[in-house]
Image (spheres, helix red, strand yellow):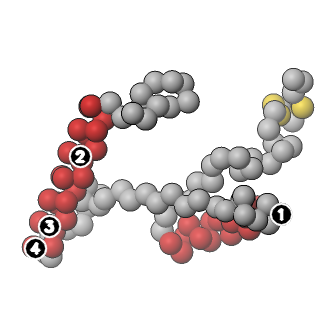
Amino acid sequence: PVYGPDGKRKNTRAVRWRERWTTDRQDLLEKLLNMNPATRHNSLFRRKRTKKIRIPIEKHPNYNFIGLIIGPRGKTQKDLEHKTGCKIAIRGKGSVKEGARGRRDGKVMEG
């Protein structure tokens, strides 16, 4: 079983069935598209692919991976997204600047 941060189960029977049904459907649609190349490529036929890449912060604690990926004002991240055609989402520890957390309306929150 897989549990979320709120303690609720994430991979229920319905979720597992929906994932299996979606992948089977996508496989069949891709086979149909390969059989008839004249068919129009539509967003219904495109498979949403995800890839999670772990950044080795534990091995290199003094290296600023997040700064290199995002770049000045997010320019490097936008360029990577444009070149690869994928969305880059940085999550986890160290993904938010220290000063950005806890602010509301430009004022530092107490706590």
- State the SS at label 2: helix
User: Which residue does the numbered mark 1 point to in the structure image?
Assistant: 62
User: Which residue does the numbered mark 2 point to in the structure image?
Assistant: 20
Earlier in the chain: of badge 4 and badge 3, it is 3
User: Which residue does the numbered mark 4 point to in the structure image?
Assistant: 36
Mark whose residue sits in front, 1 or 4: 1
Q: Is 41 on the left-hand or right-hand side of 64?
A: left
- State the SS at label 4: loop
Earlier in the chain: of badge 3 and badge 2, it is 2
Residue type at tag 1: Asn
Residue 70 can be seen, yes or no: no
Earlier in the chain: of badge 4 and badge 2, it is 2
Residue type at tag 3: Lys
How far apart are the alpha carbons under marks 2 and 1?
Answer: 42 Å
* Labels 4 & 2 near each other (Cβ < 8 A): no
Instruction: Tell me the residue at 63%/54% (across/down).
Output: 90
- Closer to the camera in the image, 14 or 30: 14
- Rendered view: 104 above or below 88: above
Percent of width and height locating residue 18: 25, 39
Instruction: Tell me the residue at 42%/27% (across/down).
Output: 9
User: Which residue does the numbered mark 3 point to in the structure image?
Assistant: 31
Percent of width and height locating residue 95: 71, 50
Question: What is the quadrant of the N terminus in the image?
Answer: top left
Question: What is the quadrant of the C terminus in the image?
Answer: top right
Percent of width and height locating residue 104: 81, 31
How far apart are the alpha carbons under marks 1 and 4?
Answer: 53 Å
Earlier in the chain: of badge 2 and badge 1, it is 2
- State the SS at label 1: loop
* Badge 3 density bin: few <14, some 14–19, many ≥20, Cα 10 Å: few
